[in-house]
Each structure stands twice: as C-alpha cells, then as structure tokens.
Amino acid sequence: MFVITADHCASSGGIASLPVFRYHIPLWIYSPKHVAPGRMDRLVSQIDIGPTVLGLLGMNYRSRFYGADIFRLEPGRERAFVGNYQRLGYLREDRLVELSPRRKVQSVKPDFEKNGLQPELPPDEALADDAIAYYQSASYLFSHGLLSTERAAASGSAPPAKTTAAR
C-alpha cells in the first residue's frame, strides 16, 4: 500500500484568517489489493489517514485517534481541522469555526475556491462547543501523556476505543 499526501506550506496565509482554499491537499492511496480505482469527494483531514489505512488493511486495533476511516465514515459526519500560528479552525459543511487567542470564537463562511473574504456568520453554539472540545481534549491528552494506550491504561483513564475493520 502506498499513501501519498502533502501538507500546506508557509504560504497558507491570505486575506482570510484561515483561508480554507489553501488547505486543500491531495491524498492518493494506491493499493490494488485493497482499494478499487476511484475518486472520493468528501471533506476529510490528515488525521483521517491513519484510521483509513488501518481499516483498508483490515486490522483490529485500539487507538485514541481523532480521525476516522473515511471509507466507513457516515455521511454528514465529515469535518476538517485547519490552523496556523494564531488560529485553530473546525470545518463542517459550509461553516468554519475559528478559535483565536483571548477565547475569541467566530463562525465564517469558508471560501473553498479563492483567496477572498470569508463573511462572518451567526454563531452556532453547538459547532463552537465541538470545536473547543476537540482542541481542548487533544491538548489535555497530549500534555498529560495520555495519547499512548499504555500510559492511558496505567492512569486509569477510560480505555481507548477498539476498532475492528470490516473489509
């Protein structure tokens, strides 16, 4: 199995605080034994690569991945995470929640095509709460060494989810 992807670069800045169009990167998975040729046009994130590869390989595993197997992700649950040195973004459907220093939270309409202004949208409290929960829980788990399954088990925290790939 060959997995080829990219990352955005230092030129990810733009007119908008988090110019979504600059975070669009390719992902190719070449594995004739596991994947039929095709194209998937769904919103996904780099954090979905690990669970997707393990799912394609049919592996049973325990993990604390925040990502999902994109071939098993239910429609409507698509999301992506973007960020830069000042802001964190949580993208769902046609809304980008931006988390900024000093606890500033705002929602904008992302421009997926060009370097343009991203107009502010009325707040969506549930989506903002999801964004904060993802980033705060990841920060907490990382800073307390709880992303390792061995360390998490020893600390008495909830056991990691077991995932069984059905392929």
Image (cartoon, grey):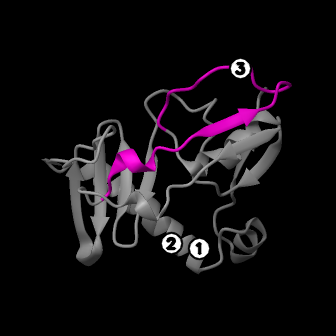
Q: Give SS at disc 2.
A: helix
Left or right relative to 41: residue 57: right
State whether residue 28 is above or below residue 126.
above
| Picture coordinates of residue 30, whole percent (x, y) | 76, 32
Q: Nearer the viewer, residue 71 or 144?
A: 71
Residue 120: x and y, percent?
A: 15, 50
Q: Residue at x 43, y 30 (%)?
A: 76
Q: Name the side, left or right, on which 67 lies relative to 51.
A: left
Reply yes or no: does residue 56 show up in magenta: no
Q: Which residues are magenta?
A: 18-43
Q: Name the amino acid, label 3.
A: Pro
User: Where is mark 3, residue-wise?
Assistant: 37
Give coordinates of residue 64: x percent, y percent.
65, 58
Mark on residue 65? none
Dot 2 and dot 1 residues touching (CB under 8 Å)? yes
CA gap, disc 2 and disc 3: 37 Å
Where residue 114 appears, as percent x and y from the top left, is 30, 42
Name the residue beneath numbered marker 2: 139
Q: Dot 3 lies on which element?
A: loop
* Secondary structure beneath label 1: helix
Q: Residues within 10 Å of mark 3 (few under 14, many from 20)?
A: few
Residue 164 appears in the figure:
no
User: Mark 2: which amino acid?
Assistant: Ser
Circles 2 and 3, Cβ within 8 Å, touching? The answer is no
99 with respect to 53 (left or right): left
Q: Is mark 3 in CB contact (under 8 Å) with mark 1?
A: no
Q: Which sits in the foreground, 21 or 73?
A: 21
First reached walking from the N terminus: tag 3 or tag 1: 3
Q: Which mark is residue 142?
A: 1
